[in-house]
Image (cartoon, rainbow, N blue to C red):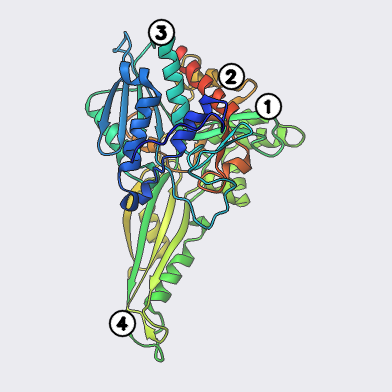
Amino acid sequence: MTAPDAVPAAETADGFAARLSRMVRIPTVSAELAQRGREPFDAFVALLEELYPLVHARLERERIGEFGLLFHWRSAHPDRGPVVLMAHYDVVPVDEHDDWSFPPFEGRIVDGIVYGRGTLDDKGQLFVVMEAVEALLAAGFSPARDVLLSFGGNEESFGDAARTIADTLHERGVEPWLVLDEGGAITDAPLPFVTGLAAMVGVGEKGLATLRLTATSAGGHASVPPPLTAVGRISRAVARLDPTTFRARTPRAITRMLRIFSGRARGIGRPLYRLLGGWPWLSARVFARIGGEPAAMVRTTIAPTLLSGGTASNVLPSFAGATLNLRLALGETVDGAAERVRRRIADPLVEVEVLEGNDASAESPVGGPGSPFALIAEAVRASHPGALTVPYVTMAATDSRYFHRYWPHVYRFAPFTMSAELRATIHGVDERIGIDELERGVTFYRTLLERLPA
C-alpha cells in the first residue's frame, strides 16, 4: 500500500488542512492489524517523511519496536532534561452501521473543518506537533534543551509501542524535564456555574485493571438444581461489587481545580466550590453521591463487561465467569484493588485473577513560575487567550502511563477546544476538527518550544 495522493486543489484551498486529511485517509486501525496488515502503518510513516522533510533531515529518527517512532532534536545543551512530546497515530475501528456525514477515512474538508477518524484522537495532535517543529526548523530555531517526539502506533489496542519507548529512554538514562501526551482539552463552562474557557491539564491518570472472576460447580440436569450454581455464585459476586466497594477520596488535583473554579463561578457556584475546595472529604462524598463522571473522579470504578457460563437451557453449568474493568483512582494499585474485590465478594469459591493492569499514576507537580506546568499555561495563553489552565485527573488510559512509572513531570493535554458534543465524537461518529483549532494547536507547541527555560 502507498500513501494516498494529495487532496485535489478543487477539494480544498488550504494545504495545511490537506496534510491532516492525507493522514486521516490512511486507515491505521491497530485493532484490525490481522485483517489489514502492516501496510497502512508503514504508509503512514512514509507519509510523515514526505510531508515533513526538515524534521527527517535534521532530527534523528529511530524505529523502536514494531510501531514506535522516536525523533531526537538535539540542542546545544544535552545536559538539561529534555522535553518529550507524545501522540499516537493509530485509530479505533469504525462501526459499519454508524451513519457518518462523510466517509470516515476520506478526510473530507468542508467549511473549514476536517472530518474523519483520528482527527481528534490522535492524529490531530501528532499533526500540530510535526507542523510546529517543521516551522521552527524552517525558521532556523534551536531549542534550549533537547526535544524528543514519541509516537506510538498501537495505543488504541493497548500495545507496547509507548512502553518500549519509555523503557528504552529509561535504560539510556534519560531524565525528561517534561512529558506531554494527549488527555484533557479546552472546554467552555467546564462545571455548572463556571464561566469561560478552561484548559484541563491532566496531572494524574487513573490506572486500569482487568479482573476475571471464575466459579465451578457440579453439572447435571437443571430439574434438580443445587442451592447455588456456578452462574448464581458469579452473579452474587458481581452484585456485591457496588459503587461503594472503593472509598471515595478527592485527589489534590481536583481540590486545586475546585479552588480555581470558585474564582470564576457565578451565583451559588462561588461559595459552593470554595467550600468543596476547602474540604476534600466533603467534595469526595458529594461527587460520589452525584454519580457519573464526578464520581469517577474520586473513586475506583468497577464495570462488569463480560459474562459467561452454561451450554444449554436445561443443563446446570459446571463453570461460570465474569470479566471486570476497573479504573483505579489515584493512589490505588492493581494488586490492592484485586484484594479489595476479593474481600468484598467474600466467597473463597470465586477465584479472582488479574488479567492485565497498570497502577494509577502519582500526581505530577503543578509548581510555580518556571515549572513545566507553568510553561504549559504560558503556551495556552498564547494559543487560546483567556483560557484558564486548570489541573485535573485524566480518567481514560493514555500512552503516558508507561512514562509516569519512571518520571514525575508527566502531563496530559491536547491544545484544542472541544465542546461536550465534539468530545463525544472521539471513538464515535463524525469525529472532526476545525482548521482554526489546528492553527491554535500549532501556536501552542511553537510557544512551548520557543519558551523552554534554560
Report helix, strand or loop for mark 3.
loop
- Mark 3 and mark 4 lie on one chain; the one further toward the N terminus is 3
Q: Which residue is mark 4?
A: 218
Judge by depth and name the residue closer to the eye, 320 or 1: 1
Which quadrant of the view contains residue 386? top right
Q: Amino acid at mark 1?
A: Gly
Judge by depth and name the residue closer to the eye, 249 or 102: 102
Marks 2 and 1 in Cβ contact (< 8 Å): no
- Mark 3 and mark 2 lie on one chain; the one further toward the N terminus is 3
Q: Which residue is mark 3?
A: 140
The residue that appears at 42% across and 61% down in the rendered structure is 344
Judge by depth and name the residue closer to the eye, 206 or 244: 206
Q: Nearer the viewer, mark 3 or mark 1?
A: 3
Q: Is residue 335 visible?
A: no
Distance in Å between CA atoms under marks 3 and 4: 75 Å
- Mark 4 and mark 2 lie on one chain; the one further toward the N terminus is 4
Q: Amino acid at mark 4?
A: Ala
Q: Which residue is mark 1?
A: 263
The reply, left or right, for residue 1 in relation to residue 326 is left
Provide residue 319's location: percent of width, then percent of height. 33, 74
Q: Amino acid at mark 2?
A: Arg
The reply, left or right, for residue 110 in relation to residue 322 is right
User: Image quadrant for the C terminus?
Assistant: top left
Q: Amino acid at mark 3?
A: Gly
Provide residue 286's location: percent of width, then percent of height. 62, 46
